[in-house]
Amino acid sequence: MARSILLLLLLAATSPASDPGRVVESVLPALAYGPSCWSSLDLHNLGDRVVTVEVEAHRASGALVPLVGHPGVVFTLNPGQSISHRLEIQEETGDAWVKVREQVPSQRLWPVVAVSGTSECAIHNQLRTTAREVAYPTRNPWFSDDVSEIPSNVISVVNTSECAAKVSLCYSAGNLYSLPGKTLAPICSQSFEVQMPPFGARQFPVARDGNSYFSLKTDGSAIVLQMLHPLATGVKIYTVDSTIKFQQ
């Protein structure tokens, strides 16, 4: 009898119910859209098993949008399969973004879907293409540094949460002040506080009226930051600057 009970316990411990799956989320921000710009989402199943992914695409305002030629949000990818889709956006809408959820059926398995994207703009009869990189949301990320050598850069901010978030901006000439017991802080020549709607996206320039120092602080549970720099002088299409590190 005791042996039978032990066998049942071992079977229960190794059954699928005791090995729950999980969801792995990836965010693809800064997808350019406008009269002469468009972007695509690329998914590639690198594994040897069928994978289910959910694709949640948003305008910069936070509103959901479908993918061209695909009415739903669920995709099934066979082993080795690759797909590419554009967001169904016709008008100028700023930067869109996409959240991809991969369903991993077991704790013993790992994610196998490679997520990437590209933005393309037709400029002066030339097609400019730049890659988009996956990012992952964190709580209250921030940036603070001298920006005199990157005055054309912008920071892409995405609120991936269903709750509103806040962004605080400080443009400074580099002057500092201190209070007793506290570290030096910049004197802001211009400062702004911006409310981010649920699932909203915005871009903020690091330079404004000749400032040399810039800081950006966020208040939100799931925020993505990316530093972007122009692909070429005078061209408003940006590529990701991976050398910039954000603090958490």
Image (cartoon, grey):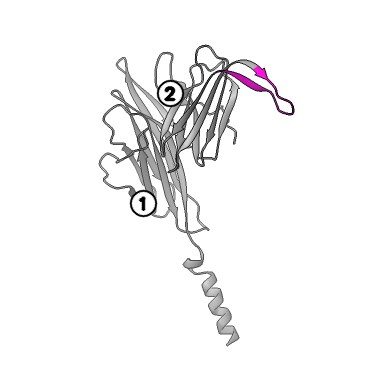
How many other residues sit within 10 Å of disc 1, few (<14), some (14-19) or many (≥20)? some
Residue named by callout 2: 238
Using residue 84 as the reference point, say whether residue 1 is left or right of it. right
Label 1 element class: loop
Front in this rendered view, residue 74 or 183: 183
Magenta span: 176-189
Does the segment drawn in magenta span residue 99?
no
Residue at the far right in the pictured view: 181
Q: Position of residue 106 (x, y in %)?
A: 48, 59
Q: CA distance from mark 2 to mark 1?
A: 33 Å
State whether residue 63 is above or below residue 50.
above
> What residue type is disc 1 on?
Asn
Q: What kind of residue is marked 2?
A: Tyr
Q: Quadrant of residue 129?
A: top left
Q: Position of residue 20 (x, y in %)?
A: 49, 61
First in sequence, mark 2 or 1: give its number. 1
Q: Give the structural element (helix, strand or loop) at label 2.
A: strand
**In the image, what residue occupies the spot 39% across and 19% down?**
236
User: Is residue 133 at least partly visible in the picture?
Assistant: no
66 left or right, relative to 22: left
Residue 177 painted magenta:
yes
Tell me, for residue 78, which label it has, or none. 1
The picture quadrant where one finds residue 162 is top left
